[in-house]
Amino acid sequence: MNIIVCVKEIKDPEMPPDQFKIDPIRNRAEISESVPPVVNPFDEQAVEAALRIKDVLGGKITILSLGYNLHREVVKKPLTMGADDIILLEDDAFVNGDSWSTAKALATAIKKIGEYDLILCGRQAADWDMGQVGLGIAEILGLPSVSTARKIEVINGKARVERVVANGYEIIEVVLPALITISNEIGQPRYAILQKIIETSRKQPTIWKPNDIGLDPSEIGNKGGRLKLVKLFQPIRESQCEIIEGESLEEAAINLSLRLREEKIL
Amino acid sequence: MVNYRNVMIYVEVIEGRLGIITKELLGVGRKLASDLGEELCAVLIGSNVSHFTKEIIAFGANKVYVVDDPLLEDYHTESYILSMTKVVEQGKPRILLLGQTPVGLDLSPRLAFRLNTDIVLDCVELAIDPEKKLLLRTKPVYGGKAMATFVSESFPQMATLRPKSMPPSEKDDSRQGEVKTIHTGLDPLAIRTRLLERVEEKAEGIKLEDAEIIIAGGRGIGGAEGFKQLEELANLLEGATVGATRAACDAGWVPTTIQIGLTGKIVAPKVYIAAALSGASQHMTGCSGSQNIVAINKDPRANIFKEAKLGVVGDWKIVLPTFIKKIHELSKD
């Protein structure tokens, strides 16, 4: 099985809320330097999904990541988990695009890679939460797709996918090659393997610039995007929490219940 | 130069009834159409669904496009995109809205790319920029830590609407409207996915989206056993049910169908009791519409205390049993 997994580097979405601010003049997020860059958690789960297939069927997993000034230890993390190869679309021209220009660049790179049975992506990036690039790649490449997968099995050239829906899941069979987006219900990604950590430290990623994949900067990144950010803001929180006290925790619990009764909340 | 006009919304029939999201879309759709001085239409795709047109008109649509075909009984990306594309070619809407639902988040991105336009998913606000008559689309970003407003000049202007962010429209059976049937001529061989099975994993009792009271537990509950206490409390209160954070669901303590948050359910109950959960933005974005948030957490600096109206700082293992006992006593009076 030849699997491509698209991976995005972002600032850790689990950051403490006070480390996140908005610069309203520049319409930009200001995140403290102390917040580390990580693999987008949904993409890390996509890597795990690929590894589970490789565990059973063997094959090759190629990581594809688009960005600028990417941290090698972050984008190479999937290799320490067991992925085989890494290609970076690393250039200023690739970034700050919308879902269209980003998907266009990734799809074009995938066309250049050429051989694949399956493309996996996280369902959304945990920074902008736009949720489109994966499916957009499928549309550009003319591939069938299944979204929000929590389990994938490959049997006889088809993928059997458990797709998360409101009240449970559906089992969808899709012909390969296909693109599947992964949701958090798939579970914990595996830890890095020592042997792989050592191998990976020596591995140099392949780097492609826009003209390596036959794209003009005007088609990609910020220049190629159509959706414009008008305003980035944080809604003002007005609430003041009233802490209910007591001589003991048990008393506080009783006071809370009485208070909720009084105010006809419960 | 194509002339795009009117607002079009995508109808979802959920468990044999018009989904609430559909009524919410008709509500905001009507407002946008009025602001534009244009009309509101709806698109209904499925098999044996034509009888819903009357109700869709009663809830505010001036016109309903219907694509009714046995091949459309189950949702499949490819067949539904083909159908939507035909409807959009006919209707040429200026604005096209869908719900941020499992179908919506699957159908909309590919549909937008197919139509060579852009889309913003999970919007909580939609407005018309009067100068250029463009759709301003606002959504939570950074896991709910901020909001972003987007605009573009591509048509149709597309967005998905987050459930519970807009009030549903009101029914008026005297409303009149037009129905237009569209034939898609689908080739079954061209659809590359097959639905093998549908598995329900519903938790017992009231649906989260309908509950008046939600008792939600987080990582601090520690296991499935702990959640039984939350269920005990829910059983004591009328209209109450149990919810959970992503951490508790991913750990397998509770079914993932009760996950509340950015990639789970969006809820807005009268009361939200948050037990042993820190209040991370990705969770809060799913419950911040609650009227009264009550927090129980042993960490006084937990983010939940910035979001709650009332709270107790303490270990839920001590606070909750006494709380349950007192509620039980009080309810006997």
Image (tube, rainbow, N blue to C red):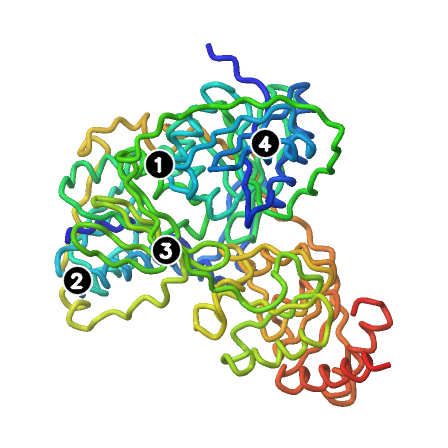
* Element assignment for label 3: strand
Question: Which subunit holds the residue at mark 2?
Answer: A
| Dot 1 amino acid type | Glu
Dot 1: what SS? Answer: helix
Q: Secondary structure at mark 2?
A: helix
Tell me the distance, in whole angstroms, between the alpha carbons under discs 1 and 3.
18 Å
Occupied quadrant, residue B59: top right
- Coordinates of residue B298 in the picture (x, y in percent): 62, 79
Residue A73 in sight from this viewpoint: yes
Amino acid bearing label 4? Leu
Horizontal side of B198 relative to B322 (left or right) equals: left
Is there a contact, CB below 8 Å, between mark 2 and mark 4?
Answer: no
The residue to which callout 4 is attached is B136
Horizontally, residue A98 falls left or right of residue A61, namely: right
Q: CA distance from mark 4 to mark 3?
A: 39 Å
Q: Name the residue beneath numbered marker 3.
A: B197
Identity of the amino acid at label 2?
Answer: Thr
